[in-house]
Image (cartoon, helix red, strand yellow):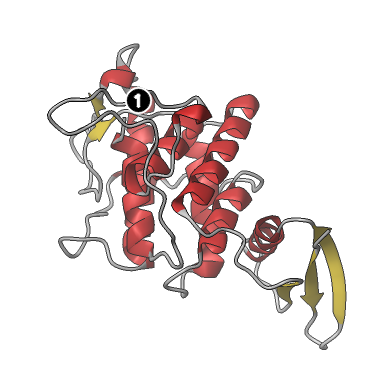
Amino acid sequence: MDKWDVVRQDDLGNEFPVAAYDSRVAALAHVLRLESGVPHKQLYWIAGPPGPALHTNRDLYLHFLHLGQEARASSWSLSTFLRSLWKVSAPLRDRDPLAPDDVAAMFSAAAATPPAEFDPAWLSKDLSLPGREPDGYGDWERVILSQLADLADFRTAPPGPQARFGVDAPRPPGTGRRATPRRWYNFDPATYLECAVAGSLGGWDTADGTRVPLAAGAEGPARSRCYLRSITTMSWADLARIAVCGQIYE
């Protein structure tokens, strides 16, 4: 069986094995968890068969679906998950584009990392995008922080039992400009993660048990799966769109 080792190098150049995994993505996630902690002079990397492990939208969809199932079992809140995701993204902020393995590892790391503290300043901060479309890590960060601010607003004005049919974020007076639509459909990590990939990349199949076939009609024949396609790299702009789909896709 293939194995990937997480290796640490200290400031004297000494190398130490940290952990071993039978999944390249899991090893990458461990590195992100370590690197998103306190500042240090140590370097981490993985040693093992070269990647990638994930090749298609289907691969990513199944990975996110599994994370969502774990989230549902663990009763994570969406705010907690997004604050962890923002925290573990920091080591990758200067890399663009990312490999699908890195994207999957970032979301896996978020599921096992204590979240960053919520900053009340996000509620009044201008988080709007500088351009018409997201571009780079900074814009992805604006999207995530905008969603966190909306979720905090919802705590004082709960969306109610009809939330799954769509509800607008309260955004009371004094709210800063935000990078995301006001409309929300998905309020838990499992639904957010599944919709994030299904809406932006596809890759689902009705056999997964999460989506029902589209009926035949004006838009074409009925579909029981989403088209398979290869993915070699992903930009932070792509990740910003994934996050928005997590919020608004049904």
Crowd rating for badge 1 (residues with CA inside 10 Å; few <14, some 14–19, many 20+): few
| Lateral position of residue 73 relative to residue 42, left or right | left
User: Among all residues in the image, which is located at the extreme front?
Assistant: 221
Whether residue 73 sits left or right of residue 128 in the image: it is: right
Q: Does dot 1 land on a helix, a strand or a loop?
A: loop
Name the residue beneath numbered marker 1. 213
Image coordinates of residue 72 in percent, x first then y, are 58, 27
Question: Residue farthest to the bottom?
Answer: 12
Quadrant of residue 111 within the rendered picture = top right
Residue under the point 23% across and 31% down: 221
In the picture as drawn, the residue positioned furthest to the left comes out as: 218
**Figure quadrant of residue 123:** top left
**Which residue: 35% across, 65% down?**
138
Residue 80 vs residue 6: left or right?
Answer: left
Rendered residue at 38%/56% (across/down): 239
Q: Quarter-wise, where is residue 165 in the image?
A: top left
> Looking at the image, can residue 4 be seen?
yes
Amino acid type, callout 1: Pro
Q: In the rendered image, is residue 148 in sight?
A: no
Q: Position of residue 160 (x, y in %)?
A: 33, 14
| In-front residue for pair 164/231 | 231
In which quadrant will I find the C terminus? top left
145 on left or right of 69: left
Task: Note whether 162 is above or below 14 in the view shown.
Answer: above
